[in-house]
């Protein structure tokens, strides 16, 4: 329930929140303490509830995306089994992980939210969504940094990125989980007021988020400056960047329309990571994310008539995936030795 006191001067204030209705009727008594009643001209109370049709709609959409993602994951994995994992490109290796995490992003445990009267299932849903988004952010950094590197050791290549993304993931999980747990435990919980002890964590989130954006822009600019004239690599970069920009722009527009000027307020981070306000917002976010992964799975899956060769030298697209600049210009030692053997 929300109250609105003098609509010209005051904002809405959440009075209480009930995740489950355990009783047939409720009675509330509201008192205005410390407020001069002569200055109040009107008080309006609004009762907001979840529509049962929206619940059914959300269940059907999640189940549909879950089935589609499971099928696409199996098909993509089966198509890649014809080749050695050492011959997979960087994008193809990441696609396996992204599709698996996408299955959990669609949350096969979501129906339990309506069957169990506790906060665990809701917290689990928030964690699964946040985890997938963190993996997606890590994928973007890895692709633009490692597209021209044959050797990607864990400590120098992946560890700094994991630490950066891990901070964003941890902050989002803590804030969203704290909000959900408090709402189940305390009906009078007010996110705008009670989240103030997490001010330092929110500041860390925004700082690390800005660092991530700057780091990603640096990797994109450097990748294009080094590979824009390199055959096949420029196509991979243009495709990955164009698809990423489409997804990011759509999500930014939806987020801006939802929050507007409230994007810098205290409740932005936990609310972004834990719930949707209407069916359009829910369908847009899930459709964009799922279609983005489906498109990449289709593009990065090998063709049916692709030659099964451990080195892929008969297929020029695959043969240059793991070659260095010197190999592209002068030829690799394997090609030279094979050419010499054929002349003999």
Image: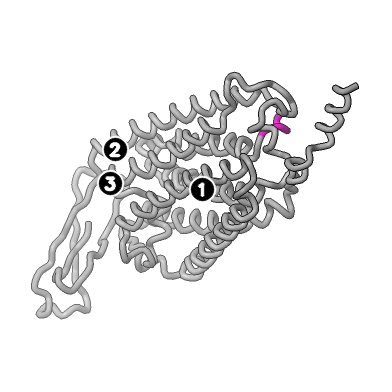
**Residue under label 2:** 55
Left or right relative to 60: residue 7: left
Give the residue displayed 40% in from the left and 41% down from the top. 288
Give the residue displayed 30% in from the left and 49% down from the top. 277
The mark that comes first in sequence, 2 or 3, is 2
Task: Determine which of the numbered discs, if any, sits on residue 241 in the image.
Answer: 1
Q: Nearer the viewer, mark 1 or mark 2?
A: 1
Q: 277 above or below 101?
A: below
Residue 88 coordinates in the image, percent (x, y)? 67, 33
Q: Nearer the viewer, mark 2 or mark 3?
A: 3
Q: Nearer the viewer, mark 3 or mark 1?
A: 1
Q: Nearer the viewer, residue 41 or 283?
A: 283
Residue 68 coordinates in the image, percent (x, y)? 44, 28
**Residue under label 3:** 278
Dot 1: element: helix
The mark that comes first in sequence, 3 or 1, is 1
Residue 184 coordinates in the image, percent (x, y)? 37, 52
Dot 3: element: loop
Q: What segment is highlighted magenta in the picture?
A: 84-88
Q: Residues within 10 Å of mark 2 (few under 14, many from 20)?
A: some
Give the residue displayed 53% in from the left and 54% down from the top. 169
Give the residue displayed 50% in from the left and 27% down from the top. 72
Rendered-image quadrant of the N terminus: bottom left
């Amino acid at each position: 329930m929300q109250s609105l006191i003098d609509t010209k001067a005051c904002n809405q204030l959440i009075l209480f929140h009930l995740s489950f209705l355990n009783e047939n009727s409720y009675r509330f008594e509201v008192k205005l303490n410390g407020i001069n009643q002569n200055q109040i001209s009107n008080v309006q109370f609004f009762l907001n509830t979840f529509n049962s049709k929206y619940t059914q709609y959300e269940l059907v959409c999640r189940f549909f995306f879950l089935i589609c993602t499971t099928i696409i994951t199996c098909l993509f994995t089966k198509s890649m089994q014809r080749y050695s994992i050492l011959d997979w490109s960087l994008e193809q290796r990441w696609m396996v992980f992204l599709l698996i995490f996408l299955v959990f992003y669609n949350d096969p445990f979501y129906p339990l939210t309506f069957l169990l009267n506790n906060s665990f299932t809701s917290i689990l849903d928030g964690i699964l969504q946040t985890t997938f988004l963190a993996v997606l952010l890590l994928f973007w950094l890895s692709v633009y940094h490692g597209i021209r590197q044959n050797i990607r050791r864990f400590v120098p290549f992946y560890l700094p990125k994991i630490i950066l993304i891990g901070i964003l993931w941890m902050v989002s999980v803590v804030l969203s989980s704290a909000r959900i747990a408090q709402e189940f435990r305390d009906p009078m919980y007010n996110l705008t007021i009670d989240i103030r002890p997490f001010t330092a964590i929110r500041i860390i989130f925004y700082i690390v988020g800005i660092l991530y954006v700057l780091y990603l822009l640096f990797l994109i600019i450097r990748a294009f400056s080094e590979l824009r004239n390199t055959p096949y690599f420029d196509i991979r970069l243009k495709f990955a960047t164009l698809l990423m920009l489409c997804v990011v722009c759509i999500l930014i527009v939806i987020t801006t329309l939802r929050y507007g000027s409230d994007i810098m307020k205290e409740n932005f981070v936990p609310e972004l990571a834990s719930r949707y306000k209407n069916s359009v917002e829910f369908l847009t976010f899930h459709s964009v994310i799922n279609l983005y992964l489906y498109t990449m799975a289709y593009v990065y899956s090998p063709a049916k008539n692709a030659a099964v060769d451990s080195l892929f030298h008969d297929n020029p697209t695959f043969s240059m995936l793991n070659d260095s600049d010197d190999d592209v210009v002068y030829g690799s030692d394997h090609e030279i030795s094979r050419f010499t053997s054929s002349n003999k």
